[in-house]
């Protein structure tokens, strides 16, 4: 599905699919109660976290950017990537985990 929305527009999730939310109070309640985590993996001293952001982070009127992977700790602390869909976020998370795992393996051999 491709559509355009303004930067900062609010979203919730239903079955891993973003849903427009025009009611800020409703969005806030959903954000407090929802499990927004896509994945979280510890690799050595790095924590790879991928979440649904709930706010469009696209700075243009293109497809909303609603998911983010970030690395906390380790040599790549602060490295991250944002995505349009849950599926992209899962794939991106797996990519970061594979890269960190490969780097850790190189260091021990």
Image (cartoon, rainbow, N blue to C red):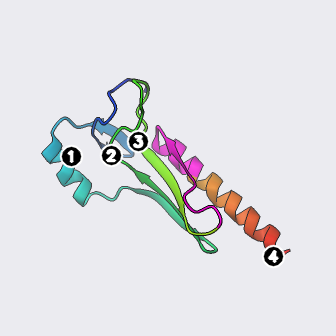
Q: Are marks 4 and 2 in contact (CB under 8 Å)?
A: no
**Disc 1 to disc 4, how far (Cα)?**
46 Å
Q: Earlier in the sequence, mark 4 or mark 2?
A: 2
Q: Position of residue 74 (x, y in %)?
A: 62, 69
Residue 53's disc is none
Q: Quadrant of the N terminus?
A: top left
Which residue carries the number 3 mark?
66
Give the magenta range: 75-92
Q: Residues within 10 Å of mark 1 (few under 14, many from 20)?
A: some
Which residue carries the number 2 mark?
54
Q: Quadrant of the C terminus?
A: bottom right
**Side of 31 relative to 45 (left or right):** left
Q: Earlier in the sequence, mark 2 or mark 3?
A: 2
**Disc 4 to disc 2, how far (Cα)?**
39 Å
> Residue shown at 81%/76% (left/top)?
108
Q: Quadrant of residue 99?
A: bottom right
Q: Position of residue 59 (x, y in %)?
A: 41, 31
> Residue shown at 27%/39% (left/top)?
10
Q: Residues within 10 Å of mark 3 (few under 14, many from 20)?
A: many
Q: Quadrant of residue 76?
A: bottom right
Q: Residues within 10 Å of mark 4 (few under 14, many from 20)?
A: few
Q: Are marks 2 and 1 in contact (CB under 8 Å)?
A: yes
**Side of 43 relative to 30 (left or right):** right
Q: Earlier in the sequence, mark 3 or mark 1?
A: 1
Which residue carries the number 4 mark?
108
Q: Earlier in the sequence, mark 2 or mark 1?
A: 1
> Residue shown at 32%/46% (left/top)?
54
Q: Are marks 2 and 3 in contact (CB under 8 Å)?
A: yes
Q: Are marks 4 and 3 in contact (CB under 8 Å)?
A: no
**Disc 2 to disc 3, how far (Cα)?**
6 Å
**Disc 3 to disc 1, how far (Cα)?**
14 Å
Q: Position of residue 98 (x, y in %)?
A: 68, 58
């Amino acid at each position: 599905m491709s559509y355009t929305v303004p930067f900062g527009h609010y979203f919730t999730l239903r079955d891993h699919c973003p849903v427009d939310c025009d009611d800020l109070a409703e969005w806030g309640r959903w954000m407090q109660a929802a499990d927004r985590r896509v994945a979280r993996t510890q690799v050595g001293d790095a924590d790879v976290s991928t979440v649904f952001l709930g706010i469009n982070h696209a700075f243009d009127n293109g497809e909303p950017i609603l998911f983010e992977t970030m690395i906390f700790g380790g040599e790549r602390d602060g490295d991250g990537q944002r995505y349009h869909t849950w599926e992209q976020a899962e794939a991106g998370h797996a990519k970061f985990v594979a890269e960190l795992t490969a780097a850790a393996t190189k260091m021990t051999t």
